[in-house]
Amino acid sequence: MTITTLQDFVLNTLIDPAVSDIHLSVNEYPWVRRGSALYLEKATWPQRIRDSDLLLLLEALGKGSHDFTVQCHEHDAAIELGDERLRLNIFRHSGNLGMIARRIPKIIPDIDALGFPEIFKAQLLKVRGLFLITGPMRTGKSTTAAAGLNFINQQVQGHILTIEDPIEFPLTAAQCKITRREVGEDTESFASGGRAALRQDANVIFFGEIRDSATMRAALSAAEAGRLVIGTLHTKSAKETVSRINSFFQESDQEWARIGLANTLNCIVSQCLIPHTSEVNKQVMCYELLVSNSAIAKSIAENQITHIGNAMVTGKSHGHVTLNSTLAEKVRLGEITREMAMHYAYDLSGLMLELS
């Protein structure tokens, strides 16, 4: 393929299935993420990107450059390019224009391919409550959420309403009616979309990201009103997730939030992606799964957050899965190294026990 424009470069780069992100900034060479590593890409674009190169790409992507470059400092969007679907973040830095393009898989993986236990699917089929998917950035939260929503779509007759920024994975109606709402286009915010969903006959409400008290309040209120609410947060563990939710609120509202969370929480899955031992650019998912029960609910309501970790370790018969147990399993299978497991563990002493 002859590469004369950045559009050609992006399309050619995406031929490699290991590529997840492409970084393009004026006065810089392109960078490409494969697996967990970011690589400088001079072989197919051997010159620094000019302002005109990136503006031409934005025009081709249907993102008129003038309004963005003059009136906004950053902009999120999801677009189609050739056979690919991309999530874009366009921004300014040091006076220059930049863009990160992330590949969005066009095929939603089957829920069983993700490797979660059966109780994970059982939580998705509950008619009400709060189901949280958490992890740092680039850990597959969107993929897990899409697979979960599609599983519900295939199993239940109802109405799935999503609030996203931007809309990412394709989701086609099967057993469920699907309503997709994009923040900034279809609704003002995650919180306002969540409040409106209660009047839109939704059985399942998906929040693409819960990042403030207004959105968390809308999610808790919807769960209390009898909806199944699925949402994502940037937290690395179940215990940290409960603590983060508590911290969203002013002290005067924290007791309300804890009681609401205790009464509505179904489960929290916290996941991470770890480089494979031997396969370059491949990543292995490890996770922990908290399944709420009376002991967990009591700990949350009474703000005894430190008890949650112990309850997960001693209550595996209730369906809890600790991160240490999945890390140790992947080490034994030879999929990740012992050193990598130690790097990603937040409870090293517990991991040493699992490994022994």
Image (cartoon, grey):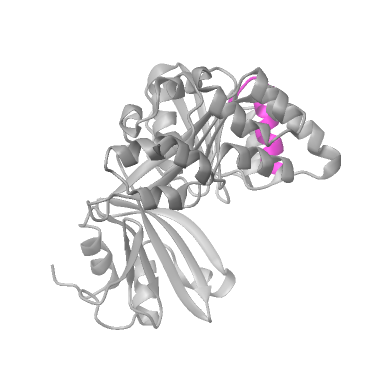
Residue at 43% over, 35% down: 354
Q: For the point 53% across and 44% down, which residue is it?
A: 347
Q: Residue at point 19% right, 72% down?
A: 3
Q: Taking 183 as reference, is 261 above or below it?
A: above
Dominant SS in magenta: helix
- Quarter of the image for the N terminus: give it: bottom left
Where residue 267 appears, as percent x and y from the top left, is: 55, 27
Residue furthest to the left in view is 1
Q: Nearer the viewer, residue 203 or 263?
A: 263
Q: Image quarter for residue 256?
A: top right
| Closer-to-camera residue (67/203) | 203
Nearest the viewer among 288 and 30 is: 288
Taking the image as shown, residue 9 lies to the left or right of residue 263, namely: left
Queried whether the magenta region covers residue 220, the answer comes back as: yes
Residue 238 on image: x %, y %: 58, 37
Stretch of the chain drawn in magenta: 214-228
Q: How many marks?
A: 0
Residue 243: quadrant of the picture: top right
Which residue sits furthest right? 252
Image height check: is 119 above or below 108?
A: above
Image location (x, y in percent) of residue 342: 44, 49
x and y percent of residue 276 in the render? 29, 49
Is 160 rendered above or below residue 352?
above
Q: Is residue 203 visible?
A: no
Residue located 63% across and 31% down the image? 308
From the image, which quarter does the C terminus lie in?
A: top left
Quarter holding residue 150 = top left
Report if residue 323 lies within the magenta region. Answer: no
